C-alpha cells in the first residue's frame, strides 16, 4: 500500500506531520507494509492535510484528515468513510484546472529525480541541449511567456538581450522572494516540484550562455530552502548540474542564497544588491540588469513560475503553450485564492477566466457567507476590485484597462464588513515600513500618506484631494514599483468605496 501525506508547509501547519506519524504507527501496529510518501500539496488548502491512497483505479483522496482519523481510515480499508473524497483528479476544484507548470506538484515525491523524469521531467532540457541559444530563446519568445512575478515583461525579450550582450561571464538569477500577501505559488513549486525549477534555470543558462545561477529565497521559507538545497545536491550528483549537463558540453551550476526579509528585495535591482552583499536598495535604470546585472555582468532575472514554465514550453513547443490564454496573455497562470474565501488554494488555469468566476465559482464566495465587497489582486500593491468589475477577464492588459494589475496573481477576498479606508491606510503604512529609503516619493510620501488618511478619518474632507495629489507624485516619481504601485490599492479604495472615507462612515463606525 502506498499512502501520500504532503510535506508542504501549508499542510504541515495544519497537522500533516502528525498524520504521517499516525499512518506509520498504525501500519506498524497492524503489521501492514505501507510505503509512506511525503509529496507536495495539490493546492486545495481547505482539504489539508489531504491523504491519498494509491489504488488500481488511481489516487483516492481523504481530507481534511487529523491524526485521530487515521485508525478509522485503516478500519475502513481506505474505502467508504466520511472523509472520502473519491479520485483526486475528480474533485471539482482540481478537475477544472489546466495544469502545465504544476503538473507534477502533489503527484510525485518532490525529491525523487526518477519520478520526476518518469512524469515528463527533463524532456524539455534534453530538447534544449540539441538546440543553440538563439533557437531556445526564439522558442520561449514564440510561446508568449511573460514574467509571472508581477511586471509581465516578455521573457523571451529579456533572454535575447542577455544572449546578445558581450561579456566574459553571464548569470541566471531566480527571484523567489515571494513577499506579496496572499501568494504561495513559488513556495509550492519549490517544496512540491523543485526539479522543474532547476530544469528551467539550466535551460535559461544554456540559452543565454550563463554557467552559474542563484536562487534568491526569502528567509521566511525554511521548508522551501531545505527542499531546494536537497534537490540541487541530488541534481548535481545525477549530472543535471555541473561541468557537463546530462553528459553534454554545456556547463551550469546553481546555489541557494537566502534574503534577510526585506520586501523591497523582491524588486530585481534591490535583489542584486543583496546578492552582492550590499544593502538592499533600488538601483537606478539604465543600465538594465540584462546588460549590467549581478557583479556588473549580463543577468537573466526571472520569477520562479516564469522559469518553472520553461520546461513544458521546450518539451511541447511554443505553439502548444501559446494556444492557451487570451490577447497578449498567453499560457497558464497559477491563481492563488486566499482571504475570506470558502475554497482557498492554488488554481492553475489559462488566462481569460473572469474575476467573478474565480471568486464566486472556483473560490465558492466568502467563508463567512456574507457578500463579497472587494477583491485585491496582485499583492499589497494591487488594486481593490469591486463586484462591479467582476466581469474583467484575467489578463495583463484587461486588468490594466480597469486600473488594476495581476502581479503575482494573488487574489485576496474581503466581505462587506471590511473598512476600505483602513485598507488604504494599511497600504501606505506597508510602504513606509518596507521602503528602502532611496527615493523621496516613496520614503516620505508613504509616511505623509498615513498621516493624510488619519486626517480623513478625523473628518478632514480636504485630505481626499491631498491624498490624490500625493498618490500621483508617488506613482510618477518613485524609482521602483514599491512606491509607484502603492497608489493602486489606495486610489482604488478611494475611487470604488468613497463612502468608507466619508464623515457618515466615521460616525457609523463610532
Image (tube, rainbow, N blue to C red):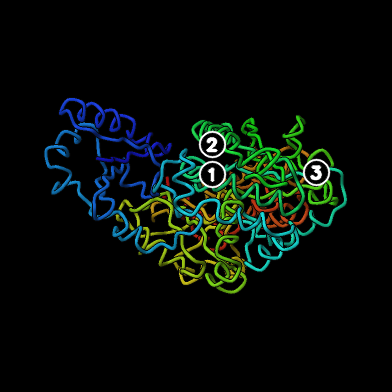
Q: Element under label 2?
A: helix
Work out whether residue 43 or residue 483 is closer to the camera in this orientation and state it.
43
Q: Nearer the viewer, residue 352 or 169?
A: 169
Q: Nearer the viewer, mark 1 or mark 3?
A: 1
Mark 2–mark 1 distance (CA, rounded to whole Å)? 7 Å
Q: Residue at x 20, y 29 (%)?
A: 26
* Pointer 1 or 3: first along the chain: 1
Give whichever of 68, 53 is nearer the camera: 53
Of the numbered discs in the image, which one, if any, rests on residue 231?
A: 2
Q: Quadrant of residue 443?
A: top right
Number of the label disc, if any, that sits on residue 82: none
In the rendered image, which residue does mark 3 sit on? Answer: 283
The answer to whether 334 is drawn above or below residue 82 in the figure is below
First in residue order: circle 2 vs circle 1: 1
Q: Position of residue 415 (x, y in %)?
A: 39, 54
Image coords of residue 160 (percent x, y): 77, 59
Mark 3 and mark 1 in contact (Cβ < 8 Å)? Answer: no
Amino acid at each position: 500500500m502506498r499512502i501520500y501525506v504532503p510535506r508542504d508547509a501549508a499542510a504541515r501547519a495544519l497537522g500533516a506531520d502528525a498524520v504521517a506519524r499516525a499512518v506509520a504507527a498504525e501500519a506498524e501496529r497492524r503489521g501492514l507494509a505501507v510505503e509512506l510518501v511525503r509529496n507536495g500539496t495539490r493546492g486545495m488548502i481547505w482539504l489539508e492535510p489531504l491523504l491519498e491512497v494509491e489504488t488500481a483505479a488511481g489516487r483516492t483522496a481523504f481530507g481534511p484528515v487529523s491524526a485521530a482519523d487515521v485508525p478509522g481510515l485503516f478500519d475502513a480499508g481506505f474505502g467508504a468513510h466520511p472523509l472520502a473524497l473519491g479520485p483526486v483528479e475528480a474533485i471539482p476544484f482540481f478537475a477544472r484546472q489546466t495544469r502545465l507548470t504544476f503538473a507534477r506538484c502533489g503527484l510525485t515525491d518532490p525529491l525523487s529525480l526518477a519520478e520526476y523524469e518518469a512524469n515528463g521531467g527533463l524532456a524539455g532540457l534534453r530538447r534544449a541541449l540539441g538546440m543553440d541559444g538563439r533557437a531556445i530563446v526564439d522558442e520561449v519568445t514564440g510561446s508568449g511567456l511573460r514574467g509571472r512575478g508581477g511586471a509581465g515583461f516578455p521573457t523571451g525579450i529579456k533572454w535575447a538581450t542577455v544572449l546578445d550582450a558581450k561579456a566574459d561571464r553571464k548569470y541566471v538569477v531566480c527571484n523567489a522572494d515571494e513577499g506579496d500577501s496572499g501568494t504561495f505559488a513559488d513556495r509550492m513549486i519549490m517544496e512540491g516540484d523543485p526539479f522543474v525549477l532547476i530544469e528551467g534555470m539550466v535551460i535559461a543558462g544554456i540559452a543565454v550562455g550563463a554557467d552559474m545561477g542563484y536562487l534568491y529565497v526569502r528567509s521566511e521559507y525554511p521548508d522551501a530552502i531545505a527542499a531546494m538545497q536537497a534537490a540541487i545536491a541530488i541534481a548535481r550528483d545525477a549530472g543535471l548540474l555541473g561541468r557537463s549537463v546530462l553528459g553534454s558540453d554545456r556547463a551550469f551550476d546553481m546555489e541557494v542564497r537566502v534574503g534577510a526579509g526585506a520586501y523591497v528585495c523582491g524588486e530585481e535591482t534591490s535583489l542584486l544588491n543583496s546578492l552582492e552583499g550590499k544593502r538592499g536598495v533600488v538601483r537606478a535604470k539604465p543600465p538594465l540588469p540584462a546588460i549590467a546585472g549581478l557583479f556588473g555582468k549580463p543577468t537573466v532575472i526571472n520569477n520562479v513560475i516564469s522559469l518553472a514554465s520553461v520546461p513544458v514550453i521546450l518539451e511541447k513547443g511554443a505553439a502548444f503553450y501559446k494556444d492557451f490564454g487570451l490577447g497578449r496573455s498567453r499560457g497558464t497562470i497559477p491563481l492563488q485564492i486566499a482571504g475570506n474565501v470558502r475554497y482557498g488554494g492554488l488554481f492553475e488555469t489559462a488566462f481569460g477566466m473572469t474575476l467573478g468566476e474565480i471568486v464566486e465559482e472556483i473560490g465558492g464566495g466568502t467563508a463567512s457567507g456574507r457578500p463579497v465587497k472587494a477583491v485585491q489582486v496582485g499583492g499589497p500593491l494591487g488594486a481593490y476590485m469591486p463586484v462591479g468589475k467582476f466581469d474583467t477577464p484575467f489578463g495583463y492588459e484587461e486588468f490594466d484597462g480597469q486600473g488594476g494589475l495581476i502581479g503575482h496573481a494573488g487574489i485576496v477576498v474581503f466581505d462587506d464588513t471590511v473598512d476600505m479606508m483602513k485598507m488604504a491606510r494599511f497600504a501606505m503604512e506597508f510602504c513606509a515600513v518596507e521602503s528602502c529609503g532611496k527615493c523621496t516619493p516613496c520614503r516620505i510620501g508613504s509616511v505623509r500618506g498615513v498621516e493624510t488618511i488619519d486626517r480623513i478619518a478625523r473628518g478632514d474632507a480636504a485630505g481626499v484631494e491631498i491624498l490624490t495629489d500625493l498618490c500621483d507624485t508617488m506613482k510618477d516619481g518613485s524609482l521602483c514599483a514599491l512606491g509607484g504601485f502603492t497608489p493602486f490599492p489606495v486610489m482604488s479604495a478611494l475611487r470604488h468605496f468613497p463612502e468608507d472615507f466619508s464623515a457618515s462612515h466615521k460616525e457609523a463606525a463610532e
